[in-house]
Amino acid sequence: MVEAVGVSKSFGSNEVLKSISLTVRPGEVLCLVGPSGSGKSTFLRLINHLETLSSGRLSVDGSLVGYRQVGEKLYELHPKDAARQRREIGMVFQRFNLFPHMTALENVMEAPQRVKRQPKAQVEQRARDLLARVGLADRADYYPAHLSGGQQQRVAIARALAMEPKLMLFDEPTSALDPELVGEVLDVMKELASSGMTMIVVTHEMGFAREVADTLVFMDGGVVVESGQPREVLANPQHDRTRAFLSKVL
């Protein structure tokens, strides 16, 4: 589903990612962990073409992300074509980014109506089904200001799912939440994973990674330091840098 080959990204002289190569198969969950500034969020943004590659190539479901290839050369897609490609990749951020003037239901309905131009009745039923799926059927008519942080993040997940993505990206989706609200968001993500959704998750929730991920990747300084089965990496890290990081978060 996702293939990264020699992916690098620099902002000026700051090389944030250094030749990252990863593969995620359909239905797998990959968790990215590591200290702040290690390049995890930048990698996610590259998969969605919210940032442009400095070198290497990224493909989702067999198609290059953000570029077309002619011979040996890559040409960046027109923004409209890149946006069309982005529809198939759902992304949930640290901050919920809900439209404050819209109810939970309207937030979930907005993209399928505006972007896919689907019939309103069909979109509304799907949105209600998704809100029920994330445990918020009774909050459909609430505005974001009247929802807890955990509820807002669950609406954000439902909104991403409304576009029927083939891949979901989560960028530290629980880091802005009060500790007692984290579980309700992780429960939704666990259900998604068990339903077969392909997911890449940047997280500090090691329990979630241990329980749900197929692969755990530890990044530091823009490189993959270590990767493997989560239980193995967490219980028996092979690199000093991984051990030092895990001793602070476990």
Image: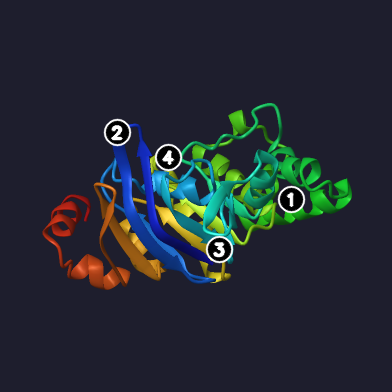
Residue in the foreground of this view, choosing between 213 and 74: 74
Three-letter code for the amino acid on which mark 2 is drawn:
Ser
Q: Nearer the viewer, mark 2 or mark 3?
A: 2
**Percent position (x, y) of residue 6?**
37, 58
Residues at circles 1 and 3 in contact by the CB criterion of under 8 Å: no
125 is higher (above) or lower (below) than 76: below
Query: Label 1 belongs to which residue?
Result: 127
Three-letter code for the amino acid on which mark 4 is drawn:
Leu
Residue in the foreground of this view, choosing between 133 and 203: 203
In the drawing, what numbered circle is on residue 13?
Answer: 2
Residue in the foreground of this view, choosing between 211 and 54: 54
For the N terminus, the quadrant is bottom right
Query: Label 4 belongs to which residue?
Result: 177
Q: Calculate the distance from the C-alpha at mark 1 to the C-alpha at mark 4.
A: 24 Å
Q: Calculate the distance from the C-alpha at mark 2 to the C-alpha at mark 3.
A: 39 Å
Three-letter code for the amino acid on which mark 1 is drawn:
Ala
Q: Secondary structure at mark 2?
A: loop
Residue in the foreground of this view, choosing between 27 and 188: 27
